[in-house]
Image: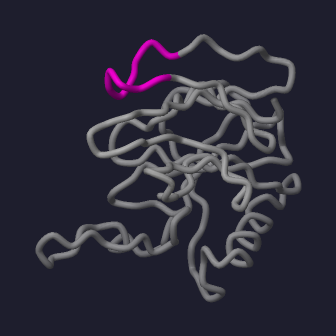
């Protein structure tokens, strides 16, 4: 569960790791800080790193960017849903004629100030597996939307009402500690 706040010290280093050849690093970029892994595996070097071009933490494999895993989006108070939809559309992550919406979801227990939301399609079939063999459907609401092959969501905390934080945990355990995410380090 993400924790928030400028004045908080880094949380303890996680007590787990993806593999023996992984090391934890406390990283900061933009307004976000988190514990992330750097792993030297037989398949290459995998790491969660800050990417200035996207203003996000992304998964990197041997110098190739694989996608956003944590990103803060500025929003304005009660209009946060419209602000975020407009920003995602302007950035090319959603088509202008999309029918996507934010749906509150109960991913895990959280303090009262935190709510989780998924960007979802109004069509339930949008996240069901395709009938063609080995076909993984494309998320109907783009790379920030609900998916059959990743746990993706936005976090809104009333203590930082001008920020929505996108988190993509992927299919398996992410290479960052979700509970360590801090906004405005």
Indicate the quadrant containing the C terminus: top left, top right, bottom left or bottom right: top right
Which region is colored magenta?
14-23
In this rendering, would 62 be left or right of 1? left
Residue at left 57%, top 57%?
A: 103
Tell me where residue 84 sits by quadrant. Answer: bottom right
Secondary structure of the magenta portion, mostly?
loop
Expressed as whole percent of the image width and height from the top left, the position of residue 32 reads 74, 38
> As rendered, which of 57 and 183 lies closer to the eye?
57
Residue at left 40%, top 61%?
A: 147
- Does the magenta run of residues contain 116? no
In this rendering, would 83 be left or right of 117? right
Expressed as whole percent of the image width and height from the top left, the position of residue 114 reads 68, 34
In this rendering, would 180 be left or right of 15? right
Is residue 12 depicted above or below 94 in this figure? Answer: above
Is residue 42 depicted above or below 5 in this figure? Answer: below
Residue at left 47%, top 23%?
A: 23
Say how many tags the image has.
0
Expressed as whole percent of the image width and height from the top left, the position of residue 133 reads 11, 74
Tell me where residue 116 sits by quadrant. Answer: top right
Expressed as whole percent of the image width and height from the top left, the position of residue 159 reads 83, 32
In this rendering, would 127 be left or right of 28? left
> As rendered, which of 167 and 102 lies closer to the eye?
167
Is residue 176 depicted above or below 68 in this figure? Answer: above
- Does the magenta run of residues contain 22? yes
The image's colour scheme reads: one colour
Indicate the quadrant containing the N terminus: top left, top right, bottom left or bottom right: top right
> As rendered, which of 96 and 22 lies closer to the eye?
22
State the residue lying farthest toward the bottom.
97
Residue at left 34%, top 47%?
A: 171
State the residue lying farthest toward the left.
133
Tell me where residue 27 sits by quadrant. Answer: top right
């Amino acid at each position: 569960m993400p924790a928030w706040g400028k004045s908080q010290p880094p949380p303890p280093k996680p007590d787990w790791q993806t593999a023996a050849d992984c090391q934890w690093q406390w990283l900061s970029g933009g307004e976000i800080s988190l514990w992330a892994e750097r792993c030297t595996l037989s398949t290459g070097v995998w790491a969660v790193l800050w990417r200035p071009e996207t203003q996000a933490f992304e998964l990197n494999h041997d110098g190739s960017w694989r996608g956003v895993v944590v990103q803060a989006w500025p929003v304005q108070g009660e209009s946060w849903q419209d602000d975020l939809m407009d920003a995602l559309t302007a950035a090319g992550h959603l088509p202008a004629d999309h029918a996507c919406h934010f749906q509150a979801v109960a991913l895990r227990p959280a303090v009262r100030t935190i709510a989780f939301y998924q960007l979802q399609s109004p069509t339930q079939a949008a996240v069901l597996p395709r009938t063609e063999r080995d076909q993984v459907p494309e998320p109907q609401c783009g790379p920030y939307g609900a998916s059959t092959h990743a746990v993706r969501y936005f976090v809104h905390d009333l203590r930082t009402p001008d920020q929505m934080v996108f988190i993509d945990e992927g299919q398996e355990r992410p290479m960052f500690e979700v509970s360590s995410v801090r906004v405005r380090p």
